[in-house]
Amino acid sequence: MNSSHNAATGEPVITFDRSETFAPLSARRLLVLGGIGLILIGMIFGDIFAVFVLHQNAARVGANLAGAAHAALLGDASAVQRYFQGVGASLENRGTKVDTHVHMIDFGYLALLLAVAEPWIALSPRTKRALAWTFLTGAGLLPVGVFLIHYVGLIYSPFEAIGWASVAADFGGLLVLVASLGYLAGLWRHFRSGSAFTDELIACTADRSRRVLLAGGMILILLGFLCGAYYAGMELYKHEARDVADLSEMASAAAARNAGAVDEALMNYGQLQGEKAVQIAAHAHAIEFGLLAMMLALFQPYVDFREKWKYRWALTLLAGSLALPVFVLLELKYGLLAGAAADLGGLLVIIALLAMWIGILRHSGAVDAVSQQASEGAS
């Protein structure tokens, strides 16, 4: 520990070198491996959902809406209610799957951010490990509970409107909240102490894989922002107007008992929802993958592969990250061919992410050793 003075205020400032080790049971290692693992599982689940559930679910929603419209033409109120119950069940099924996918990936991002901030959390290593386990347990429990909501329902639940799956999801969220508050308290203690130190990840020289991930991630985020800005400025208000027009046309056709016009309005409404979905998905995935690339760039020193392989996996991740949103945008024009290409892009991201996870798991402490030697040499 060294003492110096602030050039502006003349007040003494205590500085010391502190390197957050990457030992097998260290908090940083747990958060990095757990965070990447959560993102991997969330992406694999999302791919399975997109291929085997999403389109089939949308077809069931469309069929139930069409059935309800034709039942309304015939004046069959009980059939209308039955069809809308089918719509609600399909939407709940889709909603729980989407929430599972999104929460798992988002918790993975948060775990990686907490891993970056680990050296700035002024708590004992044992406390930080306990917080890491608490966070990862909650981050895994919440999406699993959300996934089971559609299947478990209120079976054997002591509550009138909340099932056991919802209770498990809420408890997982509570664990994440408690761990996050603990990390926040550690950050507050650090900033209150006014101490300074160096961290090996920040101090490491930027290699090719790190640079390409940082640059590629920023480009992906920029493209995502541009895509979102274009949609908001050029298409969003048109889509909102078409929404109202299609629903009004559907109601008018039903009132006039014109079955052909009802079917046409339903087809137009379904096509509009597809256009909105691909625009939003392309925009969101580009930004999401850009953030992932930039966060992974920080942890490249811990990927225990030769530099050329780290560079290849970085390029593979960026190629898949670009291909997925581009081909999602092209799905309406080229159909299943573009959808298959988008799924292939997602698969490339998963393979590259899995390779980096294995490389981090192989890490033997070389970065920590170099950082420790530099610290001892400086002292």
Image: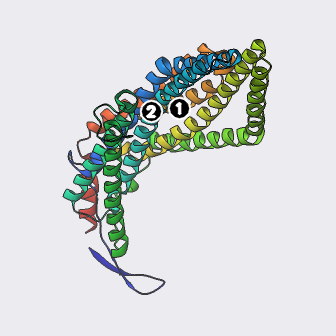
Q: Secondary structure at mark 1?
A: helix
> For the point 32% across and 39% down, which residue is it?
140
Q: Residue extending furthest bottom? A: 10
Report whether 271 appears left or right of 38.
right
> For the point 46% across and 23% down, which residue is it?
49
Residue type at mark 2? Answer: Thr
Q: Is residue 206 positioned above or below 41 on the image? A: below
| Picture quadrant where residue 285 is located | top right
Image quadrant in which the C terminus is located: bottom left
Q: Is residue 4 positioned above or below 224 on the image? A: below
Q: Secondary structure at mark 2?
A: helix
What is the CA distance from the residue labelled 2 to the residue labelled 1?
Answer: 25 Å
**Residue beneath label 1, please?**
321
Image quadrant in which the N terminus is located: bottom left
Callout 2: few (<14), some (14-19), or many (20+) C-alpha neighbours within 10 Å?
Answer: many
> For the point 27% across and 37% down, which residue is it?
361
Q: Position of residue 75 (x, y in %)?
A: 68, 18
Q: Earlier in the sequence, mark 2 or mark 1?
A: 2
Please tell me whether mark 2 or mark 1 is closer to you in this view: 2
Q: Position of residue 239 (x, y in %)?
A: 74, 34
Callout 1: few (<14), some (14-19), or many (20+) C-alpha neighbours within 10 Å?
Answer: many
Q: Position of residue 19 (x, y in %)?
A: 28, 59
Q: Judge whether residue 300 can be spotted in this image.
A: yes
| Picture quadrant where residue 322 is located | top right
Q: Position of residue 235 (x, y in %)?
A: 75, 36
**Residue beneath label 2, please?**
96
